[in-house]
Image (tube, rainbow, N blue to C red):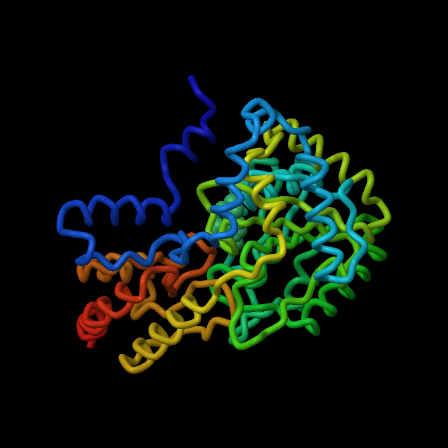
């Protein structure tokens, strides 16, 4: 006998991973250039040279130190470097003793949720949302409460959120720039959120934490600003990752920053350490902790994603598709041509187009197109998008 819930999670891969696996098999069958795989968020921009060089330089250092354990929360020097960078970039006095190094945003979120909740609590997410949130929330034996984003701008709907917060709510998860819709929450919207949470804390007499999932912070277009959430709401935990900004998803490196402005920061940071310990997320990969510390301030290369965004949105507009204009991240949220997004995704498959149906993001009627692919895939896919549109006419 095994754990039934874990068996279920392992036996049924996420819709994204399922489509990605299908794409790999299909490419092996009919050729890489015949399949237009828009399924997964694997960055197509090469990892910055500075990271590669840092890894090569580090490989020259004594192996025992290089490959040895760091403290559970991460190397103190690395954490200090990251804290200094946060302080310089965002005007907050961040300190190393509020940073916990993780194996990417996935671990940052699973740890933060476990640290902030008790079984039976509710954690609010803004739908459509990254599907794994629900897995981590339910693994902490909490309820995932979905609040639809405000349409058509996909900002946080503050009225709907106010109605969803109950005496059992312990945290709200936000993700800006957003996967899957590409929205960036405005400062005004986030200020409204901060006011709402502060008022609800007073009304309910309990702490309400904000978990800000930000792996796409640097991937924005047209010079749009991404406000630093801890400056707006003190009880914020930032879940960061270098997977997207430095194209390092396979190396599994990121961090949690427990805002220094939070009055209970010491207690929360201790709980983060405890959750990391309980979940086995200690001592993130040391080689990459140290490589990151050498490159912490280098900019991300966003130009190829901006070019892809233009190529894809211009192409799909000309074909008559409806979509949300993305302000950040590298996903396009496209209206399905029938109510049933799964059926639409299946019909797209027949044209060798791999589009993720919106159901797993908590809403029906849309698909997500990951445009972190080579521009050739986007150019090559246009006849398939055209044939798909024709199939519905
Ligand atoms: N959060 C969001 C919104 C994501 O899109 C992803 C990955 O695609 C993650 C978290 C997990 O990122 P990581 O690879 O750093 O674990």
Residue 77, horizontal then vertical, whole percent: 71, 39
Nearest the eye: 136 or 111: 111
- Residue 291 is left or right of residue 6, and the answer is right
Residue found farthest to the bottom: 318
Q: Where the C terminus falls, by quadrant? A: bottom left
- Residue 24 is left or right of residue 317, and the answer is left
Quadrant in the rendering for residue 35: bottom left
Q: Is residue 327 above or below residue 109?
A: below
Residue at left offset 79%, top offset 56%? 234
- Residue 147 is left or right of residue 2, and the answer is right
Q: Let me know if residue 362 appears in the view.
A: yes
Residue found farthest to the top: 1
Residue at left offset 64%, top offset 42%? 113
Residue at left offset 59%, top offset 74%? 224
Quadrant in the rendering for residue 308: bottom left
Quadrant in the rendering for residue 100: top right
Residue 355, horizontal then vertical, whole percent: 32, 59
Counting the numbered discs, the total is: 0
Q: Where the N terminus falls, by quadrant? A: top left
Residue 14, horizontal then vertical, whole percent: 39, 44
Nearest the eye: 117 or 20: 20
Q: Let me know if residue 132 appears in the view.
A: no
Q: Is residue 239 above or below residue 141?
A: below
């Amino acid at each position: 006998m095994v754990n039934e819930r874990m068996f279920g999670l392992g036996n049924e891969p996420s819709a994204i991973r399922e489509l990605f696996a299908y794409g790999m098999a299909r490419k092996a069958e009919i050729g890489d250039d015949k399949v237009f795989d828009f399924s997964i968020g694997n960055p197509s921009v090469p990892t910055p040279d500075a990271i590669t060089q840092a890894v090569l330089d580090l490989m020259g250092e004594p192996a025992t130190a290089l490959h040895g354990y760091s403290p559970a929360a991460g190397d103190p020097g690395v954490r200090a470097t990251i804290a200094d960078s946060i302080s310089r970039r965002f005007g907050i006095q961040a300190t190393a003793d509020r940073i916990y190094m993780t194996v990417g945003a996935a671990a940052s979120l699973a740890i933060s949720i476990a640290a902030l909740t008790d079984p039976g609590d509710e954690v609010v997410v803004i739908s459509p949302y990254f599907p794994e949130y629900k897995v981590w929330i339910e693994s902490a034996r909490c309820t995932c409460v979905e609040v639809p984003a405000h349409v058509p701008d996909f900002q946080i709907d503050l009225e709907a959120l106010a109605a969803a917060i109950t005496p059992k709510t312990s945290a709200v998860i936000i993700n800006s720039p957003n996967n899957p819709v590409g929205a960036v929450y405005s400062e005004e919207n986030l200020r409204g959120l901060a006011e709402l949470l502060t008022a609800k804390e007073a009304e309910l007499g309990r702490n309400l934490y904000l978990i800000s999932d930000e792996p796409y912070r640097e991937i924005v277009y047209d010079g749009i600003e991404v406000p630093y959430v801890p400056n707006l709401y003190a009880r914020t935990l930032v879940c960061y990752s270098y997977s997207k900004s430095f194209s390092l998803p396979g190396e599994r490196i990121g961090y949690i920053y427990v805002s220094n402005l939070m009055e209970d920061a010491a207690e929360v940071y201790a709980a983060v350490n405890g959750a990391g310990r309980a979940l086995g997320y200690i001592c993130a990969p040391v080689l990459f902790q140290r490589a990151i510390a050498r490159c912490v301030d280098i900019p991300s290369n966003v130009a190829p994603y901006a070019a892809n965004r233009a190529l894809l949105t211009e192409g799909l507009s000309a074909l008559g598709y409806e979509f949300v204009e993305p302000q950040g991240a590298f996903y396009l949220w496209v209206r399905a041509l029938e109510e049933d997004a799964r059926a639409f995704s299946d019909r797209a498959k027949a044209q060798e187009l791999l589009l993720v149906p919106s159901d797993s993001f908590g809403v029906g009627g849309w698909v997500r197109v990951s445009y972190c692919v080579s521009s050739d895939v986007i150019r090559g896919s246009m006849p398939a998008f055209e044939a798909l549109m024709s199939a519905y006419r």
